[in-house]
Image: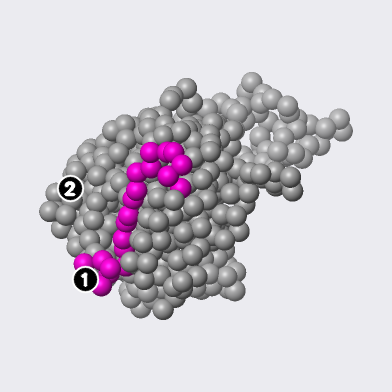
């Protein structure tokens, strides 16, 4: 082994170095005076005591090296003798160096890797090993760790090789009850020739190439990393549990739409994000569809997502236009956490109009597939993400009639690190164009087409809705009827006669028929008294409910109040709330309002 010369002092080596120097000094031939190798002044004679007897010899007179610092009697070396020089590495023994290293050290030589040396740390972990035998015989633990082929490579190539974190059963710092982990480095060396030895198999009479195996213990690092991974896994599991508990456990299924959604958290090495979706029935056959993404990861993002989702449901109950819902969410997001930014799409489907009205806050465009298979983007209008403030959101619309489908999604589905996000959206368009089947099947096909697996590094949320084209028996269960009312005293009788005839043609039971006529009469009377033309009465039936709706040109929303016994009016809305399953009102986009009520149809 070749060491670089250095001059640092090593404890406990001064006496051994001096002794080796004395033994290594050449003996003068008989009759020849001894000449020191270097010209140094001769030591002065020992001073005599006061009585004339010689005093005790000192270190200067005997030539010995002081055993400890306390043996020096002079604070500084005298001018007539040289100072003690620190030993250099040339004077040190390899055993002295490797024997004190806490790492595992083994030295082998030759193509069979015959053992030349193991240090004390190695013997403490694996036990003593006989020198001279091959590594396969003397070092079976290295064979079990898979190091013998590595040692062959090192010997052939002359280049060091390293393997990390190999497990040694019961080998953690000599603790036999605890497994240890070591990183082994195999370094090529050259074993110099040695003198004769009692065992000829041990003696190395000529230089041989060998390998030095150096094992550094990394048990604490491995255990710390395992504890960290376990902690991260627990945190991720908590975030995923929180995320899934905040998402709808079961989607509401509207009368006129088929809806399915899926959520897939990021891979095991990624913390869960803040993706969410929701389906909210608004009444009168209308449905709100929401999808959003809170930037960031972990429990914090999931908590913000939960608050935003709850707020969306609360604002949806007000039956506001999509852009007004996002406007309210924008202010709320800044109050919840100013450092968190979220994107969101809020869309409302009205089967009477056959359109999807939506507003977007920094989110990716909705994709709509027409009955002929053409896919197009509902890209405008789009505002900044929620929480930025200072922006007036606007609503847009896209046709979504019978036979059409739409997909709402988060960026984890289409965004890739090595590609522009537009390429991902284009790939989704192609996949959506060919994805047939029920909405849940479409969700699975989109995930597979976009290459989303369990190891995907980002959260993915998908919401697919279909407006089926109904034929045959299903078509008989869905009907619409409308009547324009021009005001005047004849409007109320006309409305009652129209409602009675329509409900009779739909073959409703007598009780439901009478309740429907009464509801139409009260809503029309309320509109005639408090509203302005134009007025319209609309009746709609689905497979689950009867809807009665009246629209007019006044935007003042009615409210339920308690009428006094002497009041001649004010009881219409109370009657509606009493006889109907649910009722509500909203402002219409062109100005005015709509007041509606619903009756649940008997099952079977």
Looking at the rendered structure, the secondary structure element under dot 1 is loop
Considering depth in this image, is 549 or 368 the residue closer to the camera? 549
Considering depth in this image, is 63 or 403 the residue closer to the camera? 403
Q: Please provide the residue range marked out in magenta.
A: 471-492
Q: Is residue 67 above or below residue 141?
A: above
Residue indicated by mark 2: 375
Q: Quadrant of the C terminus?
A: bottom left
Gap in Å between the C-alphas at discs 2 and 1? 27 Å
Q: Residue pushed farthest front?
A: 489
Location of residue 556 in the rendering, given as x and y in whole percent from the top left corner: 53, 34
Q: Is residue 43 above or below residue 25?
A: above
Q: Residue pushed farthest right?
A: 51
| Disc 2 crowd, CA 10 A, few/some/many (<14, 14-19, 20+) | many
Which of pointers 2 and 1 lies earlier in the amino acid sequence? 2
Location of residue 557 in the rendering, given as x and y in whole percent from the top left corner: 54, 38
Q: Is residue 35 above or below residue 370?
A: above
Looking at the rendered structure, the secondary structure element under dot 2 is strand
Using the rendered image of the protein, determine whether residue 383 is visible from the camera's viewpoint.
yes
Using the rendered image of the protein, determine whether residue 445 is visible from the camera's viewpoint.
no
Q: Left of 214 or right of it: where is 99?
A: right
Task: Say which residue appears at 60% left-offset and 29% top-offset.
Answer: 83
**Magenta region includes residue 316:** no
**Magenta region includes residue 487:** yes
Residue indicated by mark 1: 472
Location of residue 218 in the rendering, given as x and y in whole percent from the top left corner: 50, 57
Task: Say which residue appears at 49% left-offset and 41% top-offset.
Answer: 527
Disc marking residue 153: none
Task: Say which residue appears at 57% left-offset and 70% top-offset.
Answer: 178
Foreground: disc 2 or disc 1 = 1
């Amino acid at each position: 082994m070749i060491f670089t010369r250095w001059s640092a002092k090593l404890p406990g080596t001064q006496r051994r170095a001096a002794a080796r120097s004395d033994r290594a000094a050449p003996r003068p031939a008989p009759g020849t005076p001894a000449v020191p190798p270097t010209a140094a002044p001769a030591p002065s004679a020992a001073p005599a005591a006061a009585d004339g007897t010689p005093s005790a010899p000192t270190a200067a007179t005997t030539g010995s090296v002081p055993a400890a610092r306390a043996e020096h009697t002079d604070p500084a070396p005298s001018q007539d003798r040289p100072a003690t020089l620190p030993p250099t590495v040339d004077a040190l023994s390899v055993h002295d160096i490797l024997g004190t290293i806490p790492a595992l050290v083994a030295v082998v030589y030759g193509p069979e890797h015959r053992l030349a040396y193991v240090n004390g740390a190695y013997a403490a972990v694996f036990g003593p090993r006989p020198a001279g035998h091959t590594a396969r015989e003397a070092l079976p633990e290295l064979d079990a760790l898979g190091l013998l082929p590595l040692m062959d490579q090192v010997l052939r190539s002359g280049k060091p090789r390293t393997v990390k974190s190999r497990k040694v059963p019961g080998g953690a710092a000599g603790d036999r009850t605890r497994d240890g982990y070591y990183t082994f480095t195999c370094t090529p060396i050259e074993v110099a020739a040695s003198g004769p030895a009692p065992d000829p198999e041990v003696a190395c009479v000529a230089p041989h190439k060998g390998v030095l195996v150096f094992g550094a213990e990394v048990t604490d690092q491995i255990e710390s990393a395992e504890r960290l991974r376990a902690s991260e896994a627990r945190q991720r599991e908590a975030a995923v549990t929180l995320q899934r508990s905040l998402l709808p456990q079961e989607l509401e299924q509207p009368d006129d739409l088929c809806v399915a959604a899926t959520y897939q958290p990021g891979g095991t090495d990624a913390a869960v994000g803040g993706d969410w979706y929701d389906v909210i029935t608004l009444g009168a056959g209308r449905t709100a569809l929401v999808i959003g993404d809170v930037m960031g990861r972990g429990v914090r993002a999931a908590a913000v997502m939960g608050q935003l989702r709850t707020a969306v449901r609360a604002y949806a109950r007000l039956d506001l236009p999509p852009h007004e819902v996002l406007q309210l969410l924008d202010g709320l997001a800044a109050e919840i956490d100013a450092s968190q930014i979220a994107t969101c799409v809020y869309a409302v489907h009205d089967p009477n109009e056959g359109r999807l009205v939506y507003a977007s806050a920094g989110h990716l465009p909705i994709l709509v597939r027409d009955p002929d298979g053409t896919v197009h983007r509902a890209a405008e209008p789009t505002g900044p993400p929620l929480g930025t403030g200072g922006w007036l959101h606007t609503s847009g619309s896209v046709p979504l009639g019978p036979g059409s489908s739409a997909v709402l999604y988060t960026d984890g589905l289409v965004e890739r690190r090595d590609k522009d996000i537009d390429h991902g959206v284009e790939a989704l368009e192609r996949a959506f164009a060919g994805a047939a089947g029920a909405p849940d099947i479409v969700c699975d096909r989109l995930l597979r087409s976009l290459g989303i697996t369990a190891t995907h590094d980002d959260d993915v949320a998908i919401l697919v809705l279909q407006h089926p084209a109904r034929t045959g028996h299903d078509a008989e269960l869905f009907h619409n009827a409308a009547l324009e009312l021009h005001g005047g005293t004849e409007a109320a009788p006309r409305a009652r006669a129209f409602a009675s005839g329509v409900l009779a043609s739909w073959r409703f039971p007598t009780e439901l028929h009478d309740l429907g006529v009464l509801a139409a009469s009260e809503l029309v009377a309320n509109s005639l008294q408090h509203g302005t033309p134009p007025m319209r009465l609309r009746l709609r039936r689905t497979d689950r409910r009867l809807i009665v709706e009246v629209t007019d040109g006044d935007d003042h929303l009615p409210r339920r109040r308690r009428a006094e016994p002497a009041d001649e009016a004010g009881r219409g809305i109370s009657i509606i709330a009493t006889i109907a399953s649910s009722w509500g009102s909203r402002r219409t986009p062109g100005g005015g309002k709509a007041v509606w009520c619903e009756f649940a149809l008997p099952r079977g």
